Amino acid sequence: MGERARGPKEQGATMTKQRNAEADLNISHAEELKILRQIVDITSSEMDLARTLKEVVGIVNDTTQADSVFIYLFDETKTNLTLMASKLPHKKMLGNLVLKVGEGITGWVAQENKPVAISQNAYQDARFKNFDVLPEDRYEAFLSVPIVYKGKAIGVINVQHKKPHNYSSQTVNIICTIAKQVGGVIEHAVLYEHIKQKAKQFDSLVKVSQSITSENYLDEILNLIVVVTAEILNSKICSILLLDDKKEKELVIKATQSLSEEYKKKPNLNVDRSFLGEVIKCKKPLACQDVRQEQKYFYRDMAVKENLTSMIAVPMIVKDTAIGVINVYTKEPHVFTDEEIGVLQMVANQAAVAVENTKLMQEALKAKEALETRKLVDRAKGILMRMNNLSEQAAYRLIHKKSMDTCRSMKEIAESVILMDELNSASSS
């Protein structure tokens, strides 16, 4: 028997289904050549990462007439995917929206290095992950393809349509071709960005090192360090807190580039009852994804007011002893990489050296001043012993009593005695 003829009801259902799922337009040979020429232009030009991704988004959008286009790239650890470019304005999300490998359809595509095309109800797919901040999560159709370099996925391109949409094999193949061809360009652009960042970090660390060997006061050195560190890590606030010399159980803010007076004047932190105190006690870096939710973070209300979210804190260590903490905050949720933590730890170690050098210098100055004072007092004692026929002990008590009565230092009293003796000798001669 041949295929059974469809009844009116079945034909109506088929037509409804076709209307509900828009089909891809056929891409002509001329259009394919145009797309390939655009890809060649990208691969043969010298572009920074942001511009390269913007161009790729444009080509994909023109090819698919999509309502949304996203590009995710792997971070250095190759365990997380970060949203780096989009057709629609998502400035707050770019660089901050993170997926783990295997998480969501995007994470699955990156992990399996295979494309996924869903014509409708994409948000009902078992692999789908919802982001409250992205309205595209309710779009019907979803095409996700891996960006490939040397056979491995380095990122993912997502295409979405608001209405049901059938992605033809031709469209999937073209987007896969685009993703494969631009993979090398994107990887090189990422490496170039890393090199620029490392150069910036190196220059900044040189500034920190130079400040430590300068003759500036400690406050100036620490203030320079927090400003430079904030620039390196693109941080909203960077601060240095040191253990109080008299109360070793309290951390005191010694430098911050924050403009907020409320932040600058916040009370000292108790080491035993604060998040930063844990850094002092364990002598290891600690990160917090959201300080507004951290119970050991005392100033959650201020964090909300100042728009502070993620924080990383590292100990300042001298001779295996933690003497303070340097920390940075970000406005948006941020997962701090090992490289970022390593850079901050280097800065913290140099800041600790600056503090230690200053303390040693101050101790040396105090010792030098004490020696000079002792010499002056001994000389003044000799003058008083000669002029007033006093014993050494009596002459010392006289200088000490004069110091107490006049609220002047013994050094000043001794200098006065010496000056008077010199004047008397000059007038007699």
Image (tube, rainbow, N blue to C red):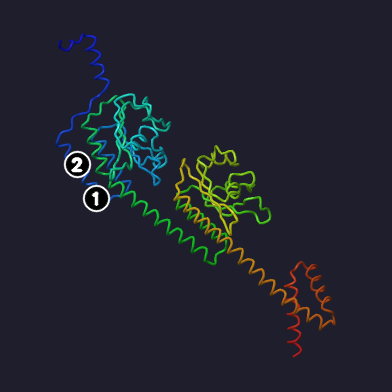
Residue at 35% of width from left, 40% of height from top? 72
Is 369 rendered above or below residue 295? Answer: below
Residue 195 location in percent, x, y? 36, 54
Q: Measuring 20% from the left and 10% from the top, which residue is drawn there?
A: 6
Would you name the residue on which mark 2 appears?
Answer: 36
Q: Label 1 sits on what residue type?
A: Ser
Find residue 84 and name its label: none
**Vertical comparison of 373 with 259: above or below:** below
Answer yes or no: is residue 87 visible. Answer: no
Percent x, y for residue 267? 63, 47
**Where residue 249 sits in the image (x, y, percent)?**
66, 50
Of the residues shown, which amino acid type is indicated by label 2? Answer: Leu
Q: Name the residue under label 1.
A: 45
Q: Position of residue 38 (x, y in %)?
A: 21, 43
241 with respect to 331 (left or right): right
Please indicate whether residue 258 sits to the left or right of residue 271 in the image: left
Can you say which quadrant of the picture contains the C terminus? bottom right
Mark 2 to mark 1 CA distance (whole Å): 14 Å
Whether residue 339 is visible to the viewer of this picture, yes or no, is yes
227 is higher (above) or lower (below) than 383: above
Residue 103 vs residue 406, the one in the foreground: 103
Mark 2 Cα-neighbour bin, 10 Å: few <14, some 14–19, many ≥20: some
